Amino acid sequence: MKIIMLGAPGAGKGTQAKMIADKYQIPHISTGDIFRANIKNGTELGQKAKTYMDQGLLVPDELVVDLVVDRVKQDDCANGYVLDGFPRTIPQAESLDAALAKFEDTIDYAINVEVPDENIVRRMSGRRACVACGATYHIVHIPTKVEGICDRCGKELILRDDDKPETVQKRLGVYHEQTQPLIDYYTNKGCLVEVDGTKDMNEVFSDIVDILSK
Ligand code: ADP
Ligand code: ADP
Ligand code: ZN
């Protein structure tokens, strides 16, 4: 099963992608996590990406497309994968489709997690992330057992630099301009499905499982 998560920053794509990956035993590929790991390790890619991420802008297509296309060709992706945060532009989607078409392959589902902009800023200010394992929490909605410590791996949680309200506003603008057109793109391909992302995270997940089991 090859799945793409679509939705605004903070819609809950990462949260749902991890649950899907666990249930269906397929890799969760988050481009944001890949960039953050590169920043943490001080790689050249990380340094380049950081200048864009800090401003709430998208990293240029040429820095992300090959990375993802190479990743989905790896053996552990043979039974599928869930892409989280990619594609984010029409050229990225076209490059992915072209790469898959070489193997007569296509995306099965593009899941659009719908959350209105008003809810997003509130969600993001409460987001806490684990850079060690990629887990995400919310101080009110999805708290950890011990404040500030990852339930999964025990490392310290951070408030992401790009989750400040000004940067979130910027990212929402970028989303509407550059990423939202993908909803029409995947509707035209016949693989778009939508879920109401304002529900509780377990309800959202059960709606997704219903769709994937049909
Ligand atoms: P969120 O989950 O809040 O939407 P991500 O972790 O997916 O945020 O992405 C964080 C940042 O990383 C983005 O704002 C952008 O700068 C960069 N990024 C991640 N994926 C992509 C992509 N596919 N294309 C361009 N930039 C990306
Ligand atoms: P995205 O990957 O789309 O940027 P995340 O999965 O990181 O979004 O979720 C953004 C924030 O909202 C996180 O703090 C997360 O814990 C929280 N969150 C995720 N799903 C829900 C939900 N259904 N209800 C309330 N908060 C949620
Ligand atoms: Zn962790």
Image (cartoon, helix red, strand yellow):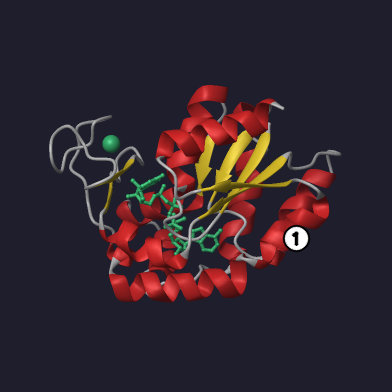
Query: For this rendering, which residue is in front, 6 or 62?
Result: 6
For mark 1, give the secondary structure.
helix
Q: Which residue is mark 1?
A: 185
Residue 157 locus on image (x, y percent): 21, 46
Location of residue 134 (image quadrant): top left
* Cβ at disc 1 under 8 Å from ligand 1: no
Q: Is residue 34 visible?
A: yes
Residue 58 placement, left or right of 104: left
Residue 112 placement, left or right of 122: right
Query: For this rendering, which residue is in front, 97 or 170?
Result: 170
Residue 19 locus on image (x, y percent): 47, 32
Estimate how packed mark 1 is, as few (under 14), some (14 to 19) or many (20 or more) residues with alpha carbons within 10 Å. Answer: some
Q: Ligand 3: which quarter?
A: top left
Name the residue at 56% across, 63% down: 63
Q: Which quadrant of the figure contains the C terminus?
A: top right
Name the residue at 53% across, 48% down: 196
Residue 34 placement, left or right of 167: right
Q: Is residue 80 visible?
A: no
Name the residue at 51% across, 69% down: 58
Task: Identify which amino acid the numbered label 1 is placed on.
Answer: Tyr
Location of residue 151 (image quadrant): top left
Tally of numbered discs: 1
Residue 8 locus on image (x, y percent): 50, 60
Residue 33 locus on image (x, y percent): 42, 49
Q: Is residue 160 above or below residue 132?
A: below
